[in-house]
Amino acid sequence: MRTPVVAATAALLLLTTACGGADSPTLEPTSSTPTLSSLDDEQVQRYLPGEGQMPPSWGQYEGEGAGDGEQATYPKTCSDLLISGRAGEDLAEGRTGSARRTYIPANAKGSAVGVKITSYEQSVPDGVFEAMGAALDECGEYQQINKEGTTTYLSEATTGPSYGDRTFRFRTREKGGDTVFERLVFSVDGALVQVLEMHTEGDEVKTTGLEMAAEATESNLRDGPREASGSQESSSVSPGF
């Protein structure tokens, strides 16, 4: 059975399949106002929620972690929901850096919160969010296929606070199971932020950790980064996501 860290890692990878691409030259900030376009991996990492922004009892895991390898989405049109369709592919061409972190709540079995920030050469276009919305309208049920087999997901729109320049919220649930991924995507200039909260509460909406991480990330992007400390690695789980 996968640990919460590995499961959260795999879920975020499903959401960001097309966010790869070759790194581009990095532009250094020229003022005290954060420059969010064309950041490299190390610079992006500084904007993740840091010390004092998440509960101190929560574990933090850095890095890529173990995902499920290559994924295919069926119907193919649903790939836009996971930013791996045409809009995501176009966006990936301008990717310059990214970083991700997984947080494990204390005494919360089966729960995890993941944050990923990706920086691009230009501001994130509205078309990315429009493509996600159109896909959600058509993809109340879709499948993810990888080397482990096929998993069917149910998806639906959700409501909640808005962040950044534009926000998109939805949730996915493994069909026939209780594992739920509450998902939030928002942009701030040239940065695309993706946050998820994994839980096993079934139909119950649970977004406390998601909102906490989103608020901290937006604050860092708007006002300047706060450095994280106390990151942990464990031999029993795959760090990061």
Image (tube, grey):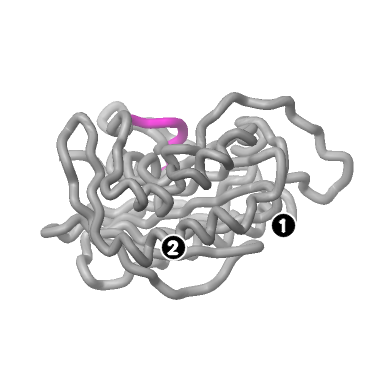
Q: Closer to the camera, 128 or 44?
A: 128
Q: Is residue 214 among what the camera can see?
A: yes
Q: Closer to the camera, 112 or 37?
A: 37
Q: CA distance from mark 1 to mark 2?
A: 29 Å
Residue at 58 percent across and 49 percent down: it is 192
Question: Disc 1 marks which amino acid?
Answer: Arg
Q: Is residue 102 left or right of residue 172?
A: right
Q: Closer to the camera, 13 or 48?
A: 13
Earlier residue among tags 1 and 2: 2
Residue 197 placed where, x, y %? 37, 57
Q: Would you say residue 195 sits in the magenta stretch?
A: no
Crowd rating for badge 2 (residues with CA inside 10 Å; few <14, some 14–19, many 20+): some
Marking on residue 93: none
- In the image, is residue 236 above or below residue 124? above
The residue labelled by disc 2 is: 134
Question: Disc 2 marks which amino acid?
Answer: Ala
The residue labelled by disc 1 is: 222
Residue 190 placed where, x, y %? 68, 47
Check disc 2 and report its element: helix, strand or loop: helix
Q: Quadrant of the N terminus?
A: top left
Check disc 1 and report its element: helix, strand or loop: helix
Q: Would you say residue 62 sits in the magenta stretch?
A: yes
- In the image, is residue 206 above or below residue 54? below
Between label 1 and label 2, give the one nearer the viewer.
2
Give the magenta-colored segment's residue range: 60-66
Residue at 17 percent across and 60 percent down: it is 178
Residue 183 placed where, x, y %? 40, 59
Residue at 23 percent across and 55 percent down: it is 153
